[in-house]
Amino acid sequence: ASDIVKLASQYRAYKEKQAPRSWQQECSILDNFVLPYFVGTSGLKDPNTWHPEHQRFKAWLLDEAVTEQGDRIAVSTANKADLQACILVHCADPCINSCFH
């Protein structure tokens, strides 16, 4: 698995421990928008190389991302997905890798 998938797994475990009542909603956004874009659409393997993709990801969230029902996602969902992507990739930085521990 790519580094970003491994990092997402760590993030999921951390969120489950830190927010036992709300982790599933946050991880749903991760699973439905962040990972499909960065792993599928952009083919990102190393989270440390995400910067060139960030603006395209934000545009994709607003212009192309859809719900399971095929509707465009809400701006608030796009903002949450962008925030999760930022947290995820910044925690790949060795200087702050202790994020999920």
Image (cartoon, rainbow, N blue to C red):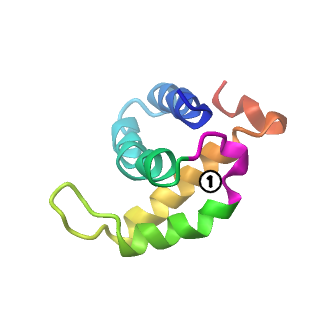
Q: Amino acid at mark 1?
A: Cys
- Seen in the image, is 89 located left or right of residue 76? right
At mark 1, the secondary structure is: helix
Q: Position of residue 12 (x, y in %)?
A: 47, 31
Q: Position of residue 24 (x, y in %)?
A: 34, 37
Identify whether 2 is placed above or below 30.
Answer: above
Q: Position of residue 42 (x, y in %)?
A: 52, 54
- Residue reaching furthest to the left: 69
Nearest the camera: 14 or 18? Answer: 14
Identify whether 88 is placed above or below 19.
Answer: below
Q: Which residues are magenta?
A: 44-51
- Seen in the image, is 80 located left or right of residue 50? left
> Which residue is pictured at 60% across the width and 44% down the height?
88
Does residue 99 show up magenta in the picture? no
Q: Quadrant of residue 2?
A: top right
Does residue 47 show up magenta in the picture? yes
Q: Residues within 10 Å of mark 1 (few under 14, many from 20)?
A: some
> Which residue is pictured at 66% across the width and 43% down the height?
47
> Which residue is pictured at 41% across the width and 45% down the height?
26
Identify whether 23 is placed above or below 63.
Answer: above
Q: Position of residue 90 (x, y in %)?
A: 70, 46
Q: Which residue is mark 1?
A: 86
> Which residue is pictured at 73% across the width and 45% down the height?
48
- Quarter of the image with the C terminus in it: top right
- Seen in the image, is 34 located left or right of residue 95? left
